[in-house]
């Protein structure tokens, strides 16, 4: 399934949007590693991602504490450092509380 199977709200969404530089060597491997590592973290609920001109990754979390722990995870911090230095031309992170969730 391409869409995350999230629980009943409330929960949180971390929305990461980015544009890449021309120096993307190693990016795909690191991105895949971060998804796999995030899935092992307490409070992780799922992830959805798409990349065209702008990349959008939305990860879902049970609570703010889980998001903070993920942000401070040592391997994730290294990925962030490489992203800032090498891969991302621009990026933005937004955190939102999900109040409603519906669909088919």
Image (cartoon, helix red, strand yellow):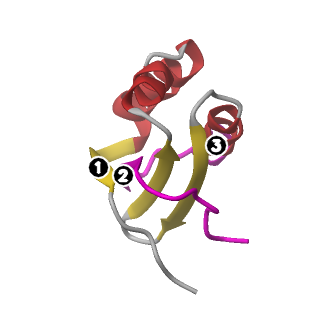
Q: Where is residue 89 shown, x and y percent of the image?
A: 29, 47
Q: Nearer the viewer, mark 3 or mark 1?
A: 1
Start and end of the magenta stretch? Answer: 1-30
Name the residue tied to disc 2: 15
Residue at image position (35%, 31%) is 84
From the viewer's side, name the closer residue of 93 and 63: 63
- Neighbours of disc 3 within 10 Å: few (<14), some (14-19), many (20+): some
* Residue 56, label in figure: none
Image quadrant for the N terminus? bottom right
Q: Is residue 11 magenta?
A: yes
Residue at image position (71%, 31%) is 40
Q: Give whichever of discs 3 and 1 has the lower sequence position.
A: 3
* Residue 35, label in figure: 3
Distance Cα–Cα, label 1 vs label 2: 8 Å
Name the residue tied to disc 1: 96
Q: Give whichever of discs 1 and 2 has the lower sequence position.
A: 2
Q: Where is residue 102 shown, x and y percent of the image?
A: 47, 77
Q: Are marks 1 and 2 in contact (CB under 8 Å)?
A: yes
| Left or right placement of residue 84 versus residue 40 in this view | left
Q: Give whichever of discs 3 and 2 has the lower sequence position.
A: 2
| Left or right placement of residue 1 versus residue 42 in this view | right
Distance Cα–Cα, label 3 vs label 2: 14 Å
From the viewer's side, name the closer residue of 2 and 89: 2
Residue at image position (71%, 39%) is 36
Image quadrant for the C terminus? bottom right
Q: Is residue 49 above or below residue 88?
A: below
Q: Is residue 24 above or below residue 82?
A: below
């Amino acid at each position: 399934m391409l869409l995350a199977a999230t629980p009943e709200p409330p929960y949180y969404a971390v929305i990461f949007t980015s544009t890449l530089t021309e120096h993307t060597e190693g990016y795909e491997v690191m991105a895949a590693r971060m998804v796999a590592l995030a899935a092992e973290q307490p409070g992780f609920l799922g992830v959805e991602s798409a990349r065209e001109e702008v990349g959008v990754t939305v990860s879902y979390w049970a609570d703010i504490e889980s998001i903070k722990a993920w942000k401070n995870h040592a391997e994730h911090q290294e990925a962030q450092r490489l992203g800032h230095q090498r891969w991302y031309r621009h990026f933005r992170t937004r955190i939102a509380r999900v109040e409603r969730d519906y669909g088919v």
